[in-house]
Amino acid sequence: MIRRIIEIDEQKCNGCGLCASACHEGAIAMVDGKAKLIRDDYCDGLGDCLPTCPTGAIQFVEREALAYDEEAVKKKMAEKAHAFRCPGSRPQMFQPSTHNVTDETEQTVTGTVKSQLRQWPVQIQLAPIQAPYFDGANLLIAADCSAYAYGDFHNKFIKIR
């Protein structure tokens, strides 16, 4: 059947993967560092992937393609929802230490800085938006390497906030 479907220009694709994340049906996957339409029958033709592409590599075309298979998409999404997830990405909240020794004293004596981490995961793409630690929270967004590059990151930017 001839229908409206997306087409990805591999030359323009920079491999960022934003379109694959935006495709709720799973029609797009990253293959050898480039986005590929892997299933015509998973593409609903609505184009949620188009506005996420920073290079304009995705466009609509009218071409011969398998019909959109809503039941197959629902089945895949259900399987994905029940698939194994890394236990390390499970949302957790930690209580701050109630130790009586001041942080400064402990740092001086042991040379160790206690973590001020209060929740996990810390990468925003891994944290579910419904995580309880987002309720009423102020969100600090920093580059992945900030905490490593700035030795006193927690004390200066996160502690008591």
Image (spheres, rainbow, N blue to C red):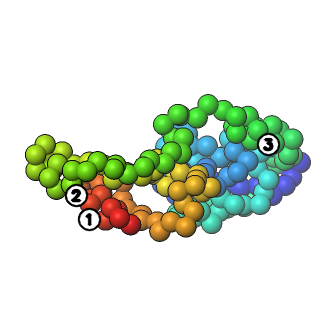
Residue 31, image x and y in percent? 55, 39
Which residue was labeled with disc 2? 152
Residue 129, image x and y in percent? 60, 57
Of the image marks 3 and 2, the number of the one nearer the N terminus: 3
- Residue name at image x 22 percent, y 58 percent: 152
Cβ atoms at labels 1 and 3 below 8 Å apart: no
Q: As shown in the figure, which amino acid type bears the numbered disc 3? A: Val
State the separation of the CA atoms marked 1 and 2: 6 Å
Q: How many marks?
A: 3
Cβ atoms at labels 3 and 2 below 8 Å apart: no
- Residue name at image x 26 percent, y 65 percent: 156
Which residue was labeled with disc 3? 73
- Residue name at image x 76 percent, y 50 percent: 43
Q: Outermost residue, right direction?
A: 1
> Where 131 sits versus 161, above or below?
above
> Where 9 sits versus 56, above or below?
above
Of the image marks 1 and 3, the number of the one nearer the N terminus: 3
